[in-house]
Image: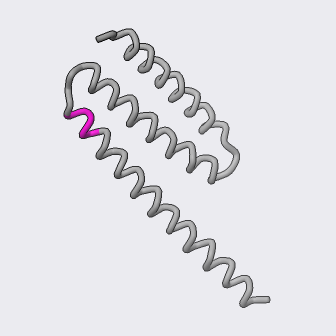
């Protein structure tokens, strides 16, 4: 097994993670920040999964899949929350007009 591929992959994921953090700090609106936080979750899941495979610990893969599922459920819940408030705000504006 060639461990240099895993090392390169881990370093590439770390560089991508840092780039996304910089983009998150420079984001102008809330929607860009939401997308970048979701992307950071995905990158961290990739990092944990590759690190777990590299070190021979399959329980890390289970942890990364759990984090992935929680990230998806959290993003769907947050989208429903945003949709609820935006739709209610738009309906209230139409009723006022």
- At 60% from the left and 38% from the top, the residue drawn is 24
The extreme front residue here reads: 1
Q: Where residue 82 appears, x then y in whole percent?
A: 56, 66
Stretch of the chain drawn in magenta:
59-63
Q: Where residue 68 appears, x then y in whole percent?
A: 37, 46
50 sits to left or right of 19 = left
Q: Where residue 33 appears, x then y in whole percent?
A: 59, 47
- At 67% from the left and 84% from the top, the residue drawn is 92
22 sits to left or right of 39 = right
Could you say which is closer to the camera, residue 72 or residue 90? Answer: 72
Q: Where residue 63 appears, x then y in whole percent?
A: 26, 39
Location of the C terminus (image quadrant): bottom right
Could you say which is closer to the camera, residue 31 or residue 47? Answer: 47
* Secondary structure mostly taken by the magenta-highlighted segment of the chain: helix
Could you say which is closer to the camera, residue 75 or residue 22? Answer: 75
Q: In this view, does 88 lie above or below 62?
A: below
38 sits to left or right of 72 = right
- At 44% from the left and 14% from the top, the residue drawn is 8
The extreme right residue here reads: 97
- At 44% from the left and 41% from the top, the residue drawn is 41
Is residue 61 within the magenta segment?
yes
Q: In this view, does 65 lie above or below 57?
A: below
Is residue 79 within the magenta segment?
no
Q: In this view, does 31 lie above or below 50?
A: below
Q: Is residue 83 above or below residue 17?
A: below
């Amino acid at each position: 097994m060639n461990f240099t591929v895993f090392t390169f992959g881990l370093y590439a994921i770390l560089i991508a993670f840092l780039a996304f953090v910089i983009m998150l700090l420079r984001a102008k609106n809330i929607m860009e920040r939401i997308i970048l936080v979701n992307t950071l979750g995905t990158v961290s899941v990739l990092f944990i999964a590759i690190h777990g495979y590299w070190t021979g610990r399959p329980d890390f893969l289970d942890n990364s899949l759990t984090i992935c599922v929680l990230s998806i459920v959290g993003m769907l819940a947050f989208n429903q929350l945003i949709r609820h408030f935006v739709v209610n705000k738009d309906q209230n504006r139409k009723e006022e007009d």
